[in-house]
Image (tube, rainbow, N blue to C red):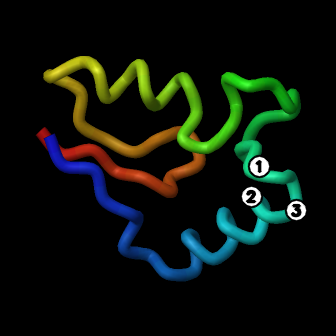
Amino acid sequence: MKITINENREVVDRIRTGLQKRGGYCPCRLQQIEDNLCMCKEFRDQIADPEFEGYCHCRLYYKQK
């Protein structure tokens, strides 16, 4: 398993700015709950699946098989 940052610098900068403004909570989620802290629970659950390949919801991270 390999997790990388999105290669699109504009996307990365936008998401990181949102993370800073929201205290580390995913800018793509409305609720500021522990499950939405970056790296969010949804993506952690997805990467636990050895068959999953793709981006997290906000497209900051990418998991390769």
Give the residue displayed 41% in from the left and 19% down from the top. 45
Give whichever of 51, 34 is nearer the camera.
34
In the rendered structure, find residue 21 and report the number of the disc placed on it.
3
Is label 2 in a helix, a strand or a loop?
A: helix
In the image, is residue 42 above or below residue 22?
A: above
The reply to whether discs 1 and 2 touch (Cβ–Cβ < 8 Å) is yes
Q: Which residue is mark 2?
A: 19
The reply to whether discs 1 and 3 touch (Cβ–Cβ < 8 Å) is yes
Q: Which residue is mark 1?
A: 27
In the rendered structure, find residue 49 and report the number of the disc placed on it.
none
Give the residue displayed 15% in from the left and 22% down from the top. 51
Asked whether, in this view, residue 49 is left or right of residue 19, the answer is left
Judge the density around disc 2: few (<14), some (14-19), many (≥20) Cα neighbours within 10 Å.
some
| Corner quadrant of residue 63 | top left
Residue 61 at x, y = what percent?
A: 42, 52
Residue 22 at x, y = what percent?
A: 86, 52
The reply to whether discs 2 and 3 touch (Cβ–Cβ < 8 Å) is yes
Judge the density around disc 1: few (<14), some (14-19), many (≥20) Cα neighbours within 10 Å.
many
